[in-house]
Amino acid sequence: MARKPIHLELTGGKGLRQRMWDRIRALHGAEFTLRGIVLGAESLETARDYVLALERGGYIESREEPNKRGFGTGVKIYRLAIDCGAEAPRVKRDGTPVTQGLAQEQMWRTLRMTKGDINARELAAHASTPMVAVTEVAAKGYLKMLNAGGYLDTTRKGHGHGNGGVLARYKLLAARDTGPRPPMVCRTKVIYDPNENRIVWQPPVTEEDAIHGR
């Protein structure tokens, strides 16, 4: 199934998968059906794909309720098997973890936990995990974007390059610690903050950019 554009997943602050996971956890282990956790105009197809992925990943388990009419397929009944916390499991259709976006999540968590200031090399080292390694280049780019978006205070400017260069140091502003979900730097270099459900920064567009469609 093709990946949906990011702005569709973020409509309303929470994607359908997160809303479904919230509802499943709220049942505290009680059984449910697919249609029982899909509301209004939400996509039944997307919900079915996610429930299948959760089942294959071992997060939920199922049994089949026989059709009361005695013919046709029965109804699948599900229940939560593994509660991994408030954040919806990021799984592919086969149940394996999705790693895309985890580097930003790990860097944001590290910035929130860090009491003092930090540079890109330190951030990369502290944010890396056995599953997802964070490179110094990625850390430098994320810090640069968060700084542009007003999240950070530059405690020391960087200068030079290579072995003789000095990396800039940053500190997360208390007023911009918006919550546990990481501000997301999208492909278009726009920063979307899911904690605030809004685009908080986008690169300025010059007249030349507008004329030439850049």
Image: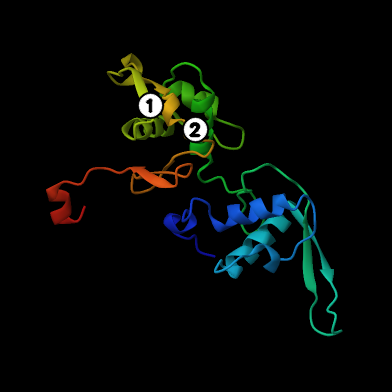
- In the rendered image, is residue 151 in sight? yes
Point out the image quarter for the N terminus: bottom right
Is label 1 in a helix, a strand or a loop? strand
Using the image as rendered, state which of residue 133 and residue 74 is in the foreground. Answer: 74
- In the rendered image, is residue 168 in sight? no
Q: Are circles 1 and 2 on residues that touch, CB within 8 Å? A: no
Using the image as rendered, state which of residue 93 and residue 164 is in the foreground. Answer: 93
Above or below, 53 against 159 in this view is below
Using the image as rendered, state which of residue 98 and residue 18 is in the foreground. Answer: 18
Identify which residue is drawn at 50% across, 64% down: 2
Left or right: 113 as drawn, with respect to 153: right
Using the image as rendered, state which of residue 152 and residue 101 is in the foreground. Answer: 152
Q: Identify the image's colour scheme: rainbow, by chain, secondary structure or one colour.
A: rainbow
Is label 2 in a helix, a strand or a loop? helix
What x and y, as percent, mark residue 51? 67, 60
Q: Crowding near pointer 2: few (<14 within 10 Å), some, many (20+)?
A: many
Mark 1, residue position: 152
Identify which residue is drawn at 51% across, 35% down: 179
Above or below, 134 against 82 in this view is above
The amino acid beneath tag 1 is Leu
Report how many numbered discs are placed on residues in the image: 2
What x and y, as percent, mark residue 10? 47, 53
What x and y, as percent, mark residue 107? 49, 31
What x and y, as percent, mark residue 17? 59, 56
Residue 5: image quadrant is bottom left
- Earlier sequence position, callout 1 versus callout 2: 2
Q: Crowding near pointer 1: few (<14 within 10 Å), some, many (20+)?
A: many
Left or right: 149 as drawn, with respect to 101: left
Mark 2, residue position: 108
The amino acid beneath tag 2 is Trp
Identify which residue is drawn at 59% across, 52% down: 18
Mark 1 and mark 2: span between their CA atoms? 11 Å
